[in-house]
Image (spheres, rainbow, N blue to C red):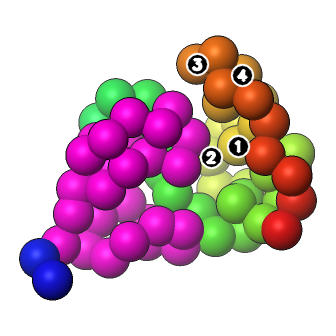
Amino acid sequence: MPPGPYRCPCCEQEDTLVAERPPPGSDGVCIHCYWQDDLVAFRHPDEVHGNCESLNGWRRQFGKAPLPPA
Ligand SMILES: [Zn+2]
């Protein structure tokens, strides 16, 4: 399977997450919302980890519903 781009786990745009492997945990960056895919942030979407905002906080900027903790 060729590497990405993949659907962004944050803004949910198709083919915007540039990564070598599928999210979550790919460390890829979305060219649309600039979210860096982060497995810890994905599992704890209300906490701030590698990005400057929590996943759910950043999703809110793009009108997306919050994700439950994994
Ligand atoms: Zn995105």
Query: Residue at left 80%, top 36%?
Result: 66
- Which image quarter: residue 61? top right
Q: At label 2, which amino acid type do we have?
A: Asn
C-alpha gap between disc 3 and disc 2: 16 Å
Principal secondary structure, stretch drawn in magenta = loop
Query: Residue at left 72%, top 22%?
Result: 60
Does mark 3 have its CB less than 8 Å from ligand 1? yes
Check whether the beta carbons of the residues at disc 3 and disc 4 lie within 8 A of each other. Answer: yes
* Residue of label 4: 60
C-alpha gap between disc 1 and disc 3: 11 Å
Query: Residue at left 59%, top 63%?
Result: 38
Percent position of residue 25, x then y:
53, 73
Left or right of residue 64: residue 24: left
* Residue of label 1: 55
In the orientation shown, which residue stands out farthest toward the left? 2
- Which image quarter: residue 31? top left
Percent position of residue 63, x then y:
64, 16
Q: Is residue 23 above or below residue 7?
A: below
Q: Which residues are magenta?
A: 3-30
* Residue of label 2: 51
Ranked by sequence position, the earlier of labels 1 and 3 is 1
C-alpha gap between disc 4 and disc 2: 14 Å
Ranked by sequence position, the earlier of labels 4 and 2 is 2
Ranked by sequence position, the earlier of labels 3 and 2 is 2
Where does the C terminus fall, quadrant-wise? bottom right
Q: Nearer the viewer, residue 6 or 37?
A: 6
* Residue of label 3: 62
Q: Nearer the viewer, residue 69 or 20?
A: 69
Q: Can residue 4 be seen by looking at this rendering?
A: yes
Does mark 1 have its CB less than 8 Å from ligand 1? no
Check whether the beta carbons of the residues at disc 2 and disc 1 lie within 8 A of each other. Answer: yes
Percent position of residue 19, x then y:
29, 64
